[in-house]
């Protein structure tokens, strides 16, 4: 190799020395990750200012639902009797989530619908088909969900119940 220099200094860098150094990648922070898909299925303020009234749900079910409803901007009230549910539903914007062993045709659900026809009503039952986000019987319920409940099913059920009640009320 011929070294060309001017005034004792090389004009070209020593390529062997230049390429023998290990090149270290720059450390950059990772970009923020997109939220999981389930978090984008429904608006984050779906329940803002609304109370989710849970009738006949076990304490474990209510404890499971409470953070889900809170993430959507709502509060959860657990009640044991239909009269308590009616009192709470009349106190402000609400959605009724009722556990029923017999499904959407339960006479208690029909009585709740007759008493507060403007309040969205969701039936939670083990005897329901996997889920029905259409109003299976608008005279009784706006959506039917199968127990055990998942977060995604609850979110979609809430959205469907609100839409179905608004549609059937007009």
Image (spheres, rainbow, N blue to C red):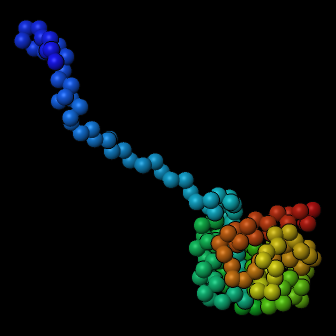
Left of 112 or right of it: where is 49? left
Q: Where residue 10 appears, x then y in whole percent?
A: 13, 15
Q: Residue furthest left?
A: 8
Q: Residue furthest top?
A: 7
Instruction: Report the residue at 81% width, 77% height from top.
Output: 144
How far across and down, in percent of the image, does residue 12 sit? 19, 16
Image: 59 above or below 15: below
Residue under the image location 48 percent in, 51 percent down: 32
> In the rendered image, which quarter is residue 96 located in?
bottom right
Dividing the picture into quadrants, the one containing residue 62 is: bottom right
Q: Which residue is at 66% across, 81% downward?
A: 77
Q: Nearer the viewer, residue 83 or 17?
A: 17
Quarter of the rendering occupied by the N terminus: top left
Residue at the (38%, 47%) spot, across then down: 29
Q: Quadrant of the C terminus?
A: bottom right
Q: Is residue 88 visible?
A: no
Q: Residue furthest front?
A: 1
Q: Eyeballing the image, is 82 above or below 25?
A: below
Looking at the image, which is closer to me, 23 or 82? 23
The answer to whether 68 appears left or right of 108 in the picture is left
Q: State the image coordinates of residue 113 (x, y, percent, origin top left).
A: 88, 79
């Amino acid at each position: 190799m011929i070294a060309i220099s001017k005034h004792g200094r090389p004009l070209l860098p020593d390529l062997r020395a230049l390429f023998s150094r290990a090149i270290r990648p720059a450390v950059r922070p990772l970009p923020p990750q997109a939220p999981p898909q389930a978090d984008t299925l429904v608006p984050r303020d779906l329940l803002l200012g609304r109370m989710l009234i849970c009738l006949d749900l076990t304490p474990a079910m209510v404890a499971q639902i409470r953070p889900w409803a809170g993430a959507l901007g709502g509060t959860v009230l657990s009640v044991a009797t239909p009269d308590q549910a009616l009192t709470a539903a009349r106190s402000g914007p609400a959605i009724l989530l009722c556990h029923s062993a017999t499904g959407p045709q339960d006479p208690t659900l029909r009585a709740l619908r007759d008493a507060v026809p403007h309040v969205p009503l969701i039936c939670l039952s083990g005897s329901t088909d996997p889920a029905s986000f259409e109003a299976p019987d608008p005279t009784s319920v706006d959506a039917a969900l199968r127990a055990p409940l998942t977060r995604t099913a609850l979110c979609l059920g809430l959205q469907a119940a609100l839409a179905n009640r608004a549609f059937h009320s007009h």
